[in-house]
Amino acid sequence: MRILVLGSGAREHAIITSLLSEDVAHEITAAPGNAGIAEVVETVALDATRGDVVADYAVDNDIELVVIGPEAPLVAGVADAVRRRGIAVFGPGAAAAQLEGSKTFAKRVMDDAGVPTGRAIRAGTYDEVVAAIDELGAPYVVKADGLAAGKGVIVTDDRTAALSHAEHYLQQGGVLVEEHLSGQEVSLFLLSDGHTVVPLSPAQDYKRIGDGDEGPNTGGMGAYSPLPWAPEGFVDEVIRTVAEPTVRQLERESTPFIGLLYCGLIVTKQGIRVIEFNARFGDPETQVVLPRLITPLSELLFAASTGQLSGRPHPEFSNDVCVTVVLASEGYPVSSAPNRPITGLDEAATVEGVHVCHAATARTDTGFVATGGRVLSVVATGSDFAHARDRAYEAIGRIGLEGGQYRTDIAARVL
Ligand code: AMP
Ligand code: GLY
Protein backbone atom coordinates (compact mmCIF):
# COMPACT_ATOMS: atom_id res chain seq x y z
CA MET A 1 0.00 0.00 0.00
CA ARG A 2 1.11 3.59 -0.55
CA ILE A 3 0.94 5.17 2.88
CA LEU A 4 1.55 8.75 3.97
CA VAL A 5 2.30 9.19 7.68
CA LEU A 6 1.97 12.72 9.09
CA GLY A 7 4.05 13.77 12.07
CA SER A 8 7.60 13.98 13.31
CA GLY A 9 7.85 12.28 16.68
CA ALA A 10 8.92 8.98 18.18
CA ARG A 11 5.29 7.88 17.87
CA GLU A 12 5.45 8.24 14.09
CA HIS A 13 8.82 6.49 14.03
CA ALA A 14 7.15 3.62 15.95
CA ILE A 15 4.18 3.51 13.55
CA ILE A 16 6.52 3.40 10.56
CA THR A 17 8.70 0.72 12.18
CA SER A 18 5.58 -1.38 12.69
CA LEU A 19 4.41 -0.90 9.10
CA LEU A 20 7.88 -1.79 7.79
CA SER A 21 7.92 -5.00 9.84
CA GLU A 22 4.95 -6.45 7.98
CA ASP A 23 5.40 -9.30 5.50
CA VAL A 24 3.95 -7.18 2.71
CA ALA A 25 6.18 -4.31 1.61
CA HIS A 26 4.58 -0.85 1.66
CA GLU A 27 5.67 2.38 0.06
CA ILE A 28 5.79 4.78 2.97
CA THR A 29 6.35 8.52 2.99
CA ALA A 30 6.56 10.60 6.15
CA ALA A 31 5.68 14.29 6.30
CA PRO A 32 7.68 15.88 7.67
CA GLY A 33 9.19 12.93 9.58
CA ASN A 34 12.43 13.33 11.51
CA ALA A 35 16.08 12.40 11.17
CA GLY A 36 15.53 8.86 12.46
CA ILE A 37 12.54 8.29 10.18
CA ALA A 38 14.56 9.62 7.23
CA GLU A 39 16.96 6.71 7.72
CA VAL A 40 14.22 4.21 6.86
CA VAL A 41 11.65 5.85 4.55
CA GLU A 42 11.27 8.82 2.23
CA THR A 43 10.42 12.08 3.98
CA VAL A 44 8.83 15.16 2.49
CA ALA A 45 8.75 18.66 3.87
CA LEU A 46 5.00 19.32 3.84
CA ASP A 47 3.14 21.54 6.24
CA ALA A 48 1.23 18.67 7.83
CA THR A 49 -1.29 21.02 9.45
CA ARG A 50 -2.59 22.33 6.08
CA GLY A 51 -5.44 20.17 4.81
CA ASP A 52 -5.22 21.46 1.23
CA VAL A 53 -1.48 20.83 1.05
CA VAL A 54 -1.74 17.30 2.42
CA ALA A 55 -4.77 16.41 0.26
CA ASP A 56 -3.08 17.68 -2.91
CA TYR A 57 0.06 15.71 -2.12
CA ALA A 58 -1.97 12.56 -1.43
CA VAL A 59 -3.89 12.86 -4.71
CA ASP A 60 -0.80 13.68 -6.78
CA ASN A 61 1.13 10.74 -5.32
CA ASP A 62 -1.60 8.08 -5.45
CA ILE A 63 -1.55 7.69 -1.69
CA GLU A 64 -3.98 4.97 -0.57
CA LEU A 65 -3.93 5.63 3.17
CA VAL A 66 -3.05 8.73 5.17
CA VAL A 67 -2.19 8.12 8.83
CA ILE A 68 -2.30 11.24 10.99
CA GLY A 69 -0.01 10.99 14.03
CA PRO A 70 -0.31 14.24 16.03
CA GLU A 71 -3.31 16.16 17.29
CA ALA A 72 -2.60 19.52 15.62
CA PRO A 73 -3.48 18.39 12.06
CA LEU A 74 -6.57 16.58 13.35
CA VAL A 75 -7.88 19.66 15.13
CA ALA A 76 -7.03 21.70 12.03
CA GLY A 77 -9.28 19.51 9.86
CA VAL A 78 -6.62 17.76 7.76
CA ALA A 79 -8.55 14.46 7.91
CA ASP A 80 -11.67 16.19 6.55
CA ALA A 81 -9.74 17.67 3.64
CA VAL A 82 -8.19 14.32 2.69
CA ARG A 83 -11.44 12.39 3.13
CA ARG A 84 -13.26 14.84 0.85
CA ARG A 85 -10.85 13.80 -1.91
CA GLY A 86 -11.88 10.16 -1.51
CA ILE A 87 -8.68 8.93 0.13
CA ALA A 88 -8.76 6.67 3.18
CA VAL A 89 -7.51 8.53 6.23
CA PHE A 90 -6.85 7.26 9.72
CA GLY A 91 -7.77 10.14 11.99
CA PRO A 92 -10.97 11.92 13.00
CA GLY A 93 -12.27 15.08 11.36
CA ALA A 94 -11.99 18.42 13.15
CA ALA A 95 -15.38 18.05 14.84
CA ALA A 96 -14.70 14.65 16.44
CA ALA A 97 -11.09 15.66 17.23
CA GLN A 98 -12.57 18.16 19.69
CA LEU A 99 -12.65 15.17 22.02
CA GLU A 100 -8.98 16.01 22.50
CA GLY A 101 -8.98 19.66 21.42
CA SER A 102 -11.46 20.82 24.02
CA LYS A 103 -11.78 19.33 27.46
CA THR A 104 -15.17 21.04 27.81
CA PHE A 105 -16.38 19.28 24.66
CA ALA A 106 -15.05 15.92 25.92
CA LYS A 107 -16.84 16.33 29.25
CA ARG A 108 -20.08 17.23 27.47
CA VAL A 109 -19.86 14.14 25.24
CA MET A 110 -19.10 11.95 28.25
CA ASP A 111 -22.07 13.42 30.09
CA ASP A 112 -24.42 12.79 27.19
CA ALA A 113 -23.06 9.28 26.65
CA GLY A 114 -23.13 8.35 30.35
CA VAL A 115 -19.36 7.71 30.47
CA PRO A 116 -17.81 7.66 33.98
CA THR A 117 -15.48 10.60 34.63
CA GLY A 118 -14.61 12.99 37.45
CA ARG A 119 -16.61 16.12 38.22
CA ALA A 120 -15.37 19.21 36.45
CA ILE A 121 -16.16 22.90 36.56
CA ARG A 122 -15.30 25.16 33.63
CA ALA A 123 -13.88 28.54 34.57
CA GLY A 124 -13.45 31.50 32.27
CA THR A 125 -12.44 34.08 34.86
CA TYR A 126 -10.12 34.17 37.85
CA ASP A 127 -13.04 34.50 40.27
CA GLU A 128 -14.65 31.41 38.77
CA VAL A 129 -11.39 29.50 39.24
CA VAL A 130 -11.20 30.50 42.90
CA ALA A 131 -14.80 29.42 43.48
CA ALA A 132 -14.24 26.11 41.67
CA ILE A 133 -11.04 25.12 43.45
CA ASP A 134 -12.56 25.95 46.81
CA GLU A 135 -15.63 23.93 45.96
CA LEU A 136 -13.74 20.83 44.78
CA GLY A 137 -10.94 21.11 47.35
CA ALA A 138 -7.34 19.82 47.46
CA PRO A 139 -5.50 18.20 45.82
CA TYR A 140 -6.29 20.72 43.11
CA VAL A 141 -6.51 19.63 39.47
CA VAL A 142 -6.48 22.49 36.96
CA LYS A 143 -6.39 21.86 33.20
CA ALA A 144 -6.05 24.05 30.16
CA ASP A 145 -9.23 23.62 28.12
CA GLY A 146 -7.39 23.50 24.79
CA LEU A 147 -4.31 21.70 23.44
CA ALA A 148 -1.18 22.13 25.57
CA ALA A 149 1.22 19.34 24.51
CA GLY A 150 0.73 17.39 27.73
CA LYS A 151 1.77 20.35 29.86
CA GLY A 152 -1.63 21.96 30.50
CA VAL A 153 -2.42 20.05 33.68
CA ILE A 154 -1.37 20.74 37.24
CA VAL A 155 -2.15 18.45 40.16
CA THR A 156 -1.07 20.08 43.41
CA ASP A 157 -1.86 20.69 47.07
CA ASP A 158 -0.49 24.19 46.68
CA ARG A 159 -3.43 26.56 46.18
CA THR A 160 -1.19 29.40 44.98
CA ALA A 161 0.42 27.16 42.35
CA ALA A 162 -3.00 25.97 41.19
CA LEU A 163 -4.17 29.56 40.82
CA SER A 164 -1.13 30.75 38.94
CA HIS A 165 -1.36 27.78 36.54
CA ALA A 166 -5.01 28.71 35.97
CA GLU A 167 -4.10 32.35 35.43
CA HIS A 168 -1.69 31.39 32.65
CA TYR A 169 -4.21 29.25 30.76
CA LEU A 170 -7.15 31.60 31.34
CA GLN A 171 -5.54 33.85 28.74
CA GLN A 172 -5.55 30.91 26.32
CA GLY A 173 -9.23 30.01 26.28
CA GLY A 174 -10.17 28.96 29.80
CA VAL A 175 -9.56 26.13 32.23
CA LEU A 176 -11.30 23.17 33.79
CA VAL A 177 -11.06 22.54 37.50
CA GLU A 178 -11.52 18.86 38.20
CA GLU A 179 -12.25 16.55 41.06
CA HIS A 180 -9.03 14.76 42.07
CA LEU A 181 -9.05 11.04 41.29
CA SER A 182 -6.57 8.53 42.60
CA GLY A 183 -5.53 5.12 41.41
CA GLN A 184 -3.37 3.49 38.74
CA GLU A 185 -3.50 5.14 35.34
CA VAL A 186 -3.99 3.21 32.11
CA SER A 187 -3.77 4.27 28.48
CA LEU A 188 -5.98 2.13 26.30
CA PHE A 189 -6.02 2.68 22.54
CA LEU A 190 -9.04 1.68 20.49
CA LEU A 191 -9.37 1.78 16.74
CA SER A 192 -12.71 3.15 15.63
CA ASP A 193 -14.33 3.15 12.20
CA GLY A 194 -17.00 5.56 13.38
CA HIS A 195 -19.24 2.82 14.76
CA THR A 196 -17.27 -0.27 15.80
CA VAL A 197 -14.32 -0.15 18.19
CA VAL A 198 -11.46 -2.63 18.45
CA PRO A 199 -8.98 -2.49 21.35
CA LEU A 200 -5.20 -2.62 21.32
CA SER A 201 -3.26 -3.83 24.37
CA PRO A 202 -3.22 -1.46 27.39
CA ALA A 203 -0.11 0.47 28.44
CA GLN A 204 0.97 2.70 31.28
CA ASP A 205 2.66 6.04 30.73
CA TYR A 206 4.89 7.96 33.17
CA LYS A 207 3.81 11.58 32.91
CA ARG A 208 6.02 13.31 35.47
CA ILE A 209 9.59 14.31 34.72
CA GLY A 210 11.19 12.73 37.77
CA ASP A 211 11.56 9.34 39.43
CA GLY A 212 8.82 8.51 41.89
CA ASP A 213 6.41 10.72 39.90
CA GLU A 214 8.03 13.92 41.15
CA GLY A 215 8.11 17.22 39.31
CA PRO A 216 6.01 18.70 36.53
CA ASN A 217 3.95 16.84 33.94
CA THR A 218 5.54 16.16 30.59
CA GLY A 219 4.43 14.65 27.30
CA GLY A 220 5.45 11.26 28.76
CA MET A 221 8.82 9.97 30.00
CA GLY A 222 8.38 6.24 29.52
CA ALA A 223 5.85 3.44 29.25
CA TYR A 224 5.34 -0.28 29.39
CA SER A 225 2.88 -2.82 28.06
CA PRO A 226 1.04 -5.07 28.87
CA LEU A 227 -0.29 -4.38 32.39
CA PRO A 228 -0.07 -7.60 34.39
CA TRP A 229 -1.96 -5.98 37.26
CA ALA A 230 -4.95 -4.81 35.18
CA PRO A 231 -8.23 -6.01 36.70
CA GLU A 232 -9.89 -9.04 35.10
CA GLY A 233 -12.14 -7.98 32.22
CA PHE A 234 -10.64 -4.49 32.18
CA VAL A 235 -10.51 -4.03 28.40
CA ASP A 236 -14.05 -5.33 27.88
CA GLU A 237 -15.33 -3.01 30.57
CA VAL A 238 -13.67 0.00 28.93
CA ILE A 239 -15.18 -0.94 25.59
CA ARG A 240 -18.65 -1.29 27.09
CA THR A 241 -18.67 1.68 29.46
CA VAL A 242 -16.34 4.18 27.76
CA ALA A 243 -15.32 3.59 24.15
CA GLU A 244 -18.53 2.33 22.58
CA PRO A 245 -20.79 4.89 24.25
CA THR A 246 -18.42 7.71 23.23
CA VAL A 247 -18.10 6.59 19.63
CA ARG A 248 -21.85 5.99 19.32
CA GLN A 249 -22.56 9.42 20.79
CA LEU A 250 -20.37 11.08 18.14
CA GLU A 251 -21.98 8.94 15.45
CA ARG A 252 -25.42 10.17 16.58
CA GLU A 253 -24.12 13.73 16.39
CA SER A 254 -23.10 13.10 12.75
CA THR A 255 -19.42 13.69 13.58
CA PRO A 256 -18.16 10.10 13.48
CA PHE A 257 -14.88 9.33 15.20
CA ILE A 258 -12.68 7.51 12.69
CA GLY A 259 -9.21 6.85 13.97
CA LEU A 260 -7.62 6.15 17.30
CA LEU A 261 -9.55 6.79 20.48
CA TYR A 262 -7.00 7.10 23.27
CA CYS A 263 -8.72 6.51 26.58
CA GLY A 264 -6.70 7.96 29.46
CA LEU A 265 -8.17 6.13 32.43
CA ILE A 266 -7.74 5.88 36.14
CA VAL A 267 -8.74 2.79 38.09
CA THR A 268 -10.22 4.24 41.29
CA LYS A 269 -11.70 2.36 44.24
CA GLN A 270 -15.09 3.34 42.84
CA GLY A 271 -14.30 1.97 39.38
CA ILE A 272 -12.84 3.08 36.07
CA ARG A 273 -12.94 6.82 35.32
CA VAL A 274 -11.85 8.72 32.22
CA ILE A 275 -9.16 11.34 32.85
CA GLU A 276 -8.91 12.45 29.26
CA PHE A 277 -9.44 11.42 25.68
CA ASN A 278 -6.94 11.90 22.93
CA ALA A 279 -7.79 11.57 19.28
CA ARG A 280 -4.54 9.87 18.23
CA PHE A 281 -1.93 7.35 19.28
CA GLY A 282 -0.18 8.22 22.54
CA ASP A 283 3.50 9.03 22.77
CA PRO A 284 5.40 7.13 24.28
CA GLU A 285 2.76 4.38 24.72
CA THR A 286 2.72 3.60 20.99
CA GLN A 287 6.39 2.68 21.19
CA VAL A 288 5.50 -0.21 23.58
CA VAL A 289 2.15 -1.28 22.15
CA LEU A 290 3.02 -1.68 18.48
CA PRO A 291 6.11 -3.91 18.82
CA ARG A 292 3.81 -6.47 20.51
CA LEU A 293 1.16 -6.31 17.77
CA ILE A 294 1.07 -9.41 15.59
CA THR A 295 -1.87 -8.46 13.34
CA PRO A 296 -0.57 -6.27 10.49
CA LEU A 297 -1.01 -2.63 11.52
CA SER A 298 -1.78 -1.48 7.97
CA GLU A 299 -4.78 -3.84 7.79
CA LEU A 300 -6.18 -2.45 11.01
CA LEU A 301 -5.66 1.19 10.07
CA PHE A 302 -7.14 0.68 6.61
CA ALA A 303 -10.14 -1.24 7.99
CA ALA A 304 -10.82 1.53 10.52
CA SER A 305 -10.46 4.21 7.85
CA THR A 306 -12.93 2.50 5.50
CA GLY A 307 -15.70 1.43 7.89
CA GLN A 308 -14.69 -2.22 8.01
CA LEU A 309 -13.96 -3.03 11.64
CA SER A 310 -17.27 -4.77 12.30
CA GLY A 311 -16.93 -8.54 12.67
CA ARG A 312 -13.12 -8.45 12.83
CA PRO A 313 -11.45 -10.46 15.57
CA HIS A 314 -9.57 -8.42 18.15
CA PRO A 315 -5.97 -7.71 17.13
CA GLU A 316 -3.46 -10.29 18.27
CA PHE A 317 -0.53 -9.43 20.58
CA SER A 318 2.59 -11.38 21.51
CA ASN A 319 3.27 -12.45 25.10
CA ASP A 320 6.50 -10.44 25.06
CA VAL A 321 6.61 -7.36 27.21
CA CYS A 322 7.86 -3.99 26.10
CA VAL A 323 9.41 -1.06 27.98
CA THR A 324 10.38 2.34 26.66
CA VAL A 325 12.49 5.00 28.35
CA VAL A 326 12.48 8.54 26.97
CA LEU A 327 15.65 10.58 26.82
CA ALA A 328 14.91 14.29 27.24
CA SER A 329 17.07 17.40 26.91
CA GLU A 330 18.41 19.36 29.84
CA GLY A 331 15.73 21.73 31.08
CA TYR A 332 12.74 19.80 29.72
CA PRO A 333 9.78 20.32 30.20
CA VAL A 334 10.46 24.00 30.86
CA SER A 335 13.12 24.59 28.22
CA SER A 336 15.40 22.61 25.97
CA ALA A 337 19.09 22.68 25.07
CA PRO A 338 19.31 22.31 21.29
CA ASN A 339 22.13 21.11 19.07
CA ARG A 340 23.98 19.00 21.58
CA PRO A 341 25.53 15.90 20.02
CA ILE A 342 24.06 12.47 20.73
CA THR A 343 26.58 9.66 20.95
CA GLY A 344 26.32 5.88 21.28
CA LEU A 345 23.20 5.31 19.18
CA ASP A 346 24.76 2.43 17.27
CA GLU A 347 26.04 0.84 20.47
CA ALA A 348 22.57 1.13 22.03
CA ALA A 349 20.92 -0.55 19.07
CA THR A 350 23.19 -3.57 19.39
CA VAL A 351 21.59 -4.52 22.71
CA GLU A 352 19.37 -7.47 21.88
CA GLY A 353 15.67 -6.66 21.62
CA VAL A 354 16.34 -2.91 21.53
CA HIS A 355 15.56 -0.25 18.96
CA VAL A 356 15.55 3.53 19.18
CA CYS A 357 12.69 5.75 18.01
CA HIS A 358 13.81 9.28 17.21
CA ALA A 359 11.80 12.36 18.15
CA ALA A 360 13.75 15.63 18.29
CA THR A 361 16.95 14.82 16.45
CA ALA A 362 18.74 16.18 13.42
CA ARG A 363 21.52 14.73 11.34
CA THR A 364 24.74 16.71 10.91
CA ASP A 365 28.01 15.86 9.17
CA THR A 366 29.31 14.35 12.36
CA GLY A 367 26.22 12.51 13.58
CA PHE A 368 22.93 13.20 15.33
CA VAL A 369 22.18 16.19 17.55
CA ALA A 370 19.24 16.80 19.87
CA THR A 371 16.83 19.51 18.69
CA GLY A 372 14.11 19.64 21.33
CA GLY A 373 12.58 18.44 24.58
CA ARG A 374 11.89 14.75 24.19
CA VAL A 375 14.81 13.61 22.08
CA LEU A 376 14.26 9.89 21.57
CA SER A 377 12.69 6.74 23.01
CA VAL A 378 14.73 3.63 23.70
CA VAL A 379 12.43 0.64 23.22
CA ALA A 380 13.19 -2.82 24.61
CA THR A 381 11.27 -6.05 24.21
CA GLY A 382 11.82 -9.04 26.49
CA SER A 383 10.23 -12.17 27.84
CA ASP A 384 9.44 -10.50 31.16
CA PHE A 385 9.71 -7.07 32.74
CA ALA A 386 13.04 -7.63 34.48
CA HIS A 387 14.47 -8.66 31.14
CA ALA A 388 12.99 -5.80 29.11
CA ARG A 389 13.97 -3.19 31.73
CA ASP A 390 17.53 -4.46 31.88
CA ARG A 391 17.79 -4.19 28.14
CA ALA A 392 16.26 -0.70 28.00
CA TYR A 393 18.55 0.67 30.72
CA GLU A 394 21.62 -1.06 29.32
CA ALA A 395 20.90 0.61 25.97
CA ILE A 396 20.09 4.09 27.25
CA GLY A 397 23.23 3.93 29.38
CA ARG A 398 25.23 3.67 26.17
CA ILE A 399 23.74 6.89 24.78
CA GLY A 400 25.49 10.14 25.55
CA LEU A 401 23.77 13.55 25.64
CA GLU A 402 25.12 16.36 27.77
CA GLY A 403 22.52 17.27 30.39
CA GLY A 404 20.20 14.54 29.11
CA GLN A 405 17.58 13.30 31.57
CA TYR A 406 15.66 10.07 31.86
CA ARG A 407 13.70 8.30 34.56
CA THR A 408 15.25 5.24 36.15
CA ASP A 409 12.01 3.73 37.46
CA ILE A 410 10.06 2.96 34.29
CA ALA A 411 8.14 -0.32 34.78
CA ALA A 412 9.83 -0.83 38.17
CA ARG A 413 6.47 -1.07 39.88
CA VAL A 414 5.61 -4.19 37.91
CA LEU A 415 8.51 -6.16 39.35
P1 AMP B 1 -4.18 14.80 31.15
O1 AMP B 1 -3.36 15.69 30.27
O2 AMP B 1 -5.60 15.21 31.29
O3 AMP B 1 -3.97 13.35 30.85
O4 AMP B 1 -3.52 14.92 32.58
C1 AMP B 1 -2.15 14.67 32.78
C2 AMP B 1 -1.95 13.91 34.06
O5 AMP B 1 -2.45 14.65 35.16
C3 AMP B 1 -2.72 12.59 34.11
O6 AMP B 1 -2.05 11.56 33.49
C4 AMP B 1 -2.82 12.40 35.60
O7 AMP B 1 -1.63 11.88 36.13
C5 AMP B 1 -3.02 13.78 36.12
N1 AMP B 1 -4.45 14.05 36.24
C6 AMP B 1 -5.27 14.58 35.30
N2 AMP B 1 -6.53 14.68 35.76
C7 AMP B 1 -6.53 14.21 37.02
C8 AMP B 1 -7.54 14.04 38.01
N3 AMP B 1 -8.80 14.43 37.80
N4 AMP B 1 -7.17 13.51 39.19
C9 AMP B 1 -5.88 13.14 39.41
N5 AMP B 1 -4.89 13.27 38.52
C10 AMP B 1 -5.19 13.79 37.33
N1 GLY C 1 1.54 9.99 26.58
C1 GLY C 1 0.49 10.91 26.66
C2 GLY C 1 -0.05 11.35 25.37
O1 GLY C 1 0.31 10.85 24.33
O2 GLY C 1 -0.88 12.23 25.38
Image (spheres, grey):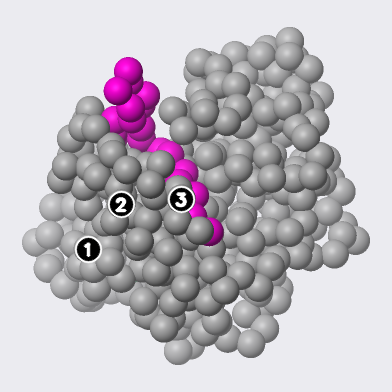
Question: Which residue range is magenta in the image?
Answer: 353-372
Q: Residue beneath label 2, please?
A: 398
Give, as a three-letter code, the residue at label 3. Thr
Residue at image point 52% right, 28% down = 39
Residue at image point 41% right, 69% down = 389
Residue 55 is situated, as x and y percent measured from the top left of the image, at 67, 18
Is 225 displayed left or right of 194 in the figure?
A: left
Q: Secondary structure at mark 3?
A: loop
Q: Quadrant of residue 97?
A: top right
Q: Are marks 3 and 2 in contact (CB under 8 Å)?
A: no
Residue 234 is situated, as x and y percent measured from the top left of the image, at 62, 80
Vertical position of residue 283 compared to residue 84: above or below: below
Give yes or no for residue 359 being in the magenta stretch. yes
Is 107 displayed left or right of 253 in the figure?
A: left
Vertical position of residue 62 compared to residue 19: above or below: above
Give, as a three-letter code, the residue at label 1. Gly
Q: Residue beneath label 1, please?
A: 210
Q: For the residues marked 2 and 1, what is the alpha-carbon distance in whole angstroms? A: 20 Å
Is 226 displayed left or right of 304 in the figure?
A: left
Q: Residue beneath label 3, please?
A: 350
Q: Residues within 10 Å of mark 3 (few under 14, many from 20)?
A: few
Q: Of helix, strand and loop, which mostly describes the magenta segment?
A: strand
Q: Residue furthest left?
A: 160
Q: For the residues marked 3 and 1, what is the alpha-carbon distance in whole angstroms? A: 27 Å
User: Is residue 249 at least partly visible in the picture?
Assistant: no
Is 413 displayed left or right of 161 in the figure?
A: right
Q: Secondary structure at mark 2?
A: loop
Residue 381 is situated, as x and y percent measured from the top left of the image, at 53, 63
Give, as a three-letter code, the residue at label 2. Arg
Give yes or no for residue 302 being in the magenta stretch. no
